[in-house]
Amino acid sequence: MKNYPSLTLLFFLIGSISLFSATSKANSENPLYPFVFENKETHQVKLLNDGSSSFYKRLDLIRHAKESIVMEYFIFNHDVVGKIMAHELMRKVKEGVKVQILVDNFMVGSTLTPHHSAELLRRGIEIKYYSPIPVINAVKTQYRNHRKLFVVDDLHYIVGGRNIGDDYFDLSERYNFIDRDAVFTGPSALDARKSFDAYFNSKLSKIKLRTPMPTINQLEFLRSGQSQKARILQQVRADRRIWKERKSKGRAFLKFSLREKKEINKLMDIGKKSFEKEFSGTCDNLQFVSDRPLIGPSNDKNRITRHYIYKYLTNAKSEINIDSPYFILNDKLIDIIEGQLDSDIPVTLLTNGIYSSDALPVAAVFNHYLKGWIEKGLSPSVYSGKSLYPEDAYVSKAVADSRWGTHSKTMSIDNKLSVIGSYNFDPRSADFSMELVVACHGNENLAKAIKSDINLRRANSINFETVEDAKKHEFHNISMFKQMGYYLIKPLSLLLQGLL
């Protein structure tokens, strides 16, 4: 009898090892691995609905990291959040933690310049830029890395809609995003990290080195006449001034003021409280889906994420809840959603209107089709543009009173399927951007928690039940000047909607 506990433990360990081996084997035999994989081991899941709680958890994970931190983002701003992230990562490098950052060159190239990367590289932080193709190549520059992935110690990873910037973590006094992330803790974190490695080590990802300070070409200078020498000197002085300014800005990226420190400390205090209120649960049937690092029209048939989005929507049996900042659909998605509406499956949508959007052309196109969607049975809501919570939930009144818009990329389907990631319902995510999503199948509590938070946001939105509602609220909170701009850009936006 005394040996039974030991035998039970032994059988448990053997079973666990067998399950892990079977999962690993299944993933390794998948030709799309590590861009598509499944894991049926138990993962802890924590939703990060609030910007403050999401910021708090990111810094908490960084500060407790022991071995590695990898970060992959579409946007990484030179602002308070960007600087504190860089500062915290720099501290971890000194402790022996390996830190790697991958950013999209098109969106970040002018924000995190080679002067920024030089300072990070000098301090041991590996940073690369995805697809640093000259803007003159108008076709290939459309293919951007829109993935958002943050992995710590191959055990925890965060996916969702947030980039690195003040406006994603409730710190901007002008415009803030209401977003949604989730942190997953479990064995699939290692597989997620391998998808990062594939991008980081791709031939499309490059280190951008700082050029030397501009100098005079002595031979050209000696051969020039007096007037030409004067022009050469003037140009070199101007180039040196710009170079020094950029170098100074790069160094300033690793410093922050007392005011900024106070802001961060207050955000962390707020975030800790909001984090404790966020939904905690598990996922026992996890699916990770990502596009591969491929660019150009010739790779259109190799896109992955959109096809899984199609599948999730097509397989819905009772209800579909979508939260997306943009809603411009291709023919395939139109057919799927119209088909579900025709089958009396309710589809609710939370997106942005003209006031709450950060992209007026997208709002113009959405408004053009809004009345038709209402007639087909869609239940759309556009976010009001106001903050969700009382003033004391933010670092200042100015932040609370700023303009707000949804930026979440999530779905709750049939109260059983949760989908969270970087995929927007727009042509960019379908045809151009590299995207990823994590789906949790069969967890009712998680799906209902996401649905509940979407409904909380819809309660702070303009909800359309009839075409008359759409007409009535089309220019909610919009100035006459912005209405004029709207009408000016609408024809061009409709013409180019495939690129929005």
Image (spheres, rainbow, N blue to C red):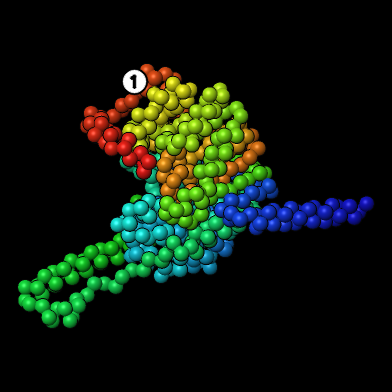
Q: Secondary structure at mark 1?
A: helix
Q: Is residue 152 visible?
A: no
Number of marks? 1
From the top left corner, tell me how far across and down residue 220 is, in percent.
Answer: 16, 78
Residue 115, percent from left and from top: 33, 65
Which residue does the image show at 14% across and 72% down from the upper left?
A: 232
Please say if 331 is above or below 226. Answer: above
35 to the left or right of 215: right
Using the image, determine if residue 102 lies above or below residue 372: below
Residue 211 sits in quarter:
bottom left
* Residue 496 drawn above or below residue 472: below
Q: List x then y, in percent, for residue 480.
A: 23, 28
| 189 and 119: which is toward the camera | 189
- Residue at point 63% right, 54% down? 30
In the rendered view, does 155 fall on the left or right side of 109?
A: right
Tell me if I can see residue 458 in this picture.
yes
Q: Nearer the viewer, residue 116 or 427?
A: 427
Q: In percent of the image, x 31 and y 26: which residue is there? A: 475
Q: Which residue is mark 1?
A: 472
Residue 149, how many percent across, how many down?
A: 50, 52
- 277 or 248, which is in the foreground? 248
The answer to which of 254 and 484 lies nearer the viewer is 484
Q: Quadrant of the C terminus?
A: top left
Few, some or many residues within 10 Å of mark 1 (<14, 14–19, 20+):
few
Q: Amino acid at mark 1?
A: Lys
- In the image: residue 76, left or right of residue 191: left
Q: Is residue 244 above or below residue 224?
A: above
Q: Residue furthest right?
A: 1
Q: Is residue 208 left or right of residue 52?
A: left
